Amino acid sequence: MIAVAADPTDLANLRLVSKQWCAVSSRLFGLANLRHPRFIISPYSLQGLVDLTAHPIFGPCVESVNIGSYRLKKHLVNTQPHLDINHANAAVLKQFRFEQTGSHLNLLAQAFANLRDHGVMPMLGAFEDIVHLAPDNEVVRRGYGYDELYGPIDVLKCGNTQVAQTLVSLIEASLNSDHAPSGVSVDVKWDPNDREAVSLHSGLYSLLYNLSIQNCGCLKSPKDLTVTLTSGKDKIRNKHHLEIRNKNSHLRLIRVSIEEYEDSIFPQLEPGIFGPLFDACYHGQFHQITLSDCEIDRSVFGLLKTHARSLRHLTLHQIVFHDYEPDDAVDLFLVLRDDLALYTIDFERFAFSNKHSALEMFREDHGYQPFFGCGQVVALLSGLIRWVQVQNTKLRRFEDDEVHEHNGHDDGNDDGEHHDYEYEGEDEWEDEGASGDDDRDHRDYEQSND
């Protein structure tokens, strides 16, 4: 019981207390720290993978095998005299021979065979060891054995990224071990100033397409697929995900922009950035869609309507909807109510925003707001439609404000108006729709944080 309640960072020390405590806490330690280990292409690193997967306690904890994509350029060592020639040359020869002889495939296949014996179907992942966006914005993700192979070498200057080749090696080793993976993932750099990510890597787009997409654009096999884009040092805010979970037909978009305009701080949902998984988003029939911390506009209508026949569960978490036209906000809820047949819809912090004002509903302090059953979902959406219509009328949020500015009238509130919606239960819909009860309209005239 004490081990279960312990902080994950304390489990390593807890294992050192005694043999009994080691036995009690080892599996918890593995689940906390070894589910998604990272490695590189080197004898030392992949032997560590084999040893980990062979362990009777830690082996079953492994859920994914992730290999760094960088390889040293074997000819660079002779053209960079300012580097440690001996160490760089030795590292290049070690890595090159290890890969050319196929020894890396043998160790990977052995590791997958160990996982097969444990009953584990792992995700296969390739990640960029180094994410370099600017001199002051560089992320080095050291897999196991990184320092042992590279030491003082500047891998960014002396190496190049080979994401597709790394993924091919993982897949080939999985086939050699006769153990199918649960899915495939890639984690690559995304520069906010660039409209490409997956397409920047030679062979990666076609590889993902052949792995996952049929000629019609539909998903080929029941495998999970994930594209993660890393855009800086922040481990949470600078991670952008497109995940397809085929087991429960679930599409998840996290910190992604689904907008017509291209000035978002998030990557756009388009082929150059997310590769063939973009096609899967618009051709696969998903039963559940989750949008989390995303920026959207009317462009999201097409995505939702694509899955109108299959979509039953929708989650909207920390969403900013940019309503550029007067009816955009109303149209969103009309699409959700009339074009979809949702059984559940979950809200947590949802806001409409334009240059005039912000309408915020299901604020962060309201917590998680789930709605179950078609009747409750329709009632919720009908109430939201009426509420937004009332707010638009009260605020005269569009043409009237523009005329007001044009005539030179300035009320001193340049930040726009911020109006909050509070959900109080099903009885709210009849009262608010009929009387427009102002007690539920909270005006604080603050600048919206969204």
Image (cartoon, rainbow, N blue to C red):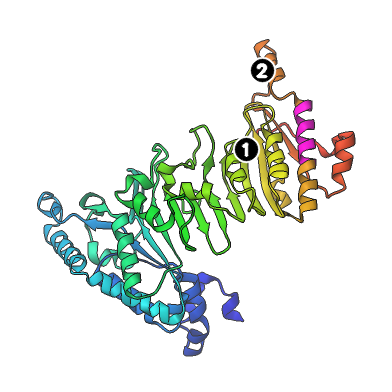
Q: Nearer the viewer, residue 333 or 40?
A: 333
Q: Secondary structure at mark 1?
A: strand
Q: Where's residue 388, x and y in %? A: 75, 35
Density class for disc 1 (Cα within 10 Å; few <14, some 14-19, many ≥20) is many
What's the residue type where badge 1 is placed?
A: Phe
Identified at 72% across, 18% down, the residue is 400
Q: What residue is disc 1 on?
A: 321
Give the answer, above or below, for where 383 lies relative to 148.
above
State which quadrant residue 248 falls in: bottom right
State which quadrant residue 49 falls in: bottom left
Q: What residue is disc 2 on?
A: 402
The magenta segment is: 383-394
Identified at 43% across, 49% down, the residue is 276
Q: Where's residue 403, x and y in %? A: 69, 14
Q: Nearer the viewer, residue 385 or 322?
A: 385
The disc label shown at residue 21, or none: none
| Position of the N terminus by quadrant | bottom right
State which quadrant residue 439 falls in: top right
Separation of disc 2 and disc 1 at Cα?
21 Å
Q: Nearer the viewer, residue 244 or 414?
A: 244
Q: Where's residue 272, x and y in %? A: 40, 42
Give the answer, above or below, for where 40 lies relative to 49.
above
Q: Where's residue 60, x and y in %? A: 46, 78
What's the residue type where badge 2 is placed?
A: Glu
Residue 240 in view? no
Answer whether residue 50 is magenta in the image: no
Residue 56 in view? yes
Q: Secondary structure at mark 2?
A: helix
Tell whether label 1 touches label 2 (CB within 8 Å): no
User: Which residue is outermost to the top?
Assistant: 407
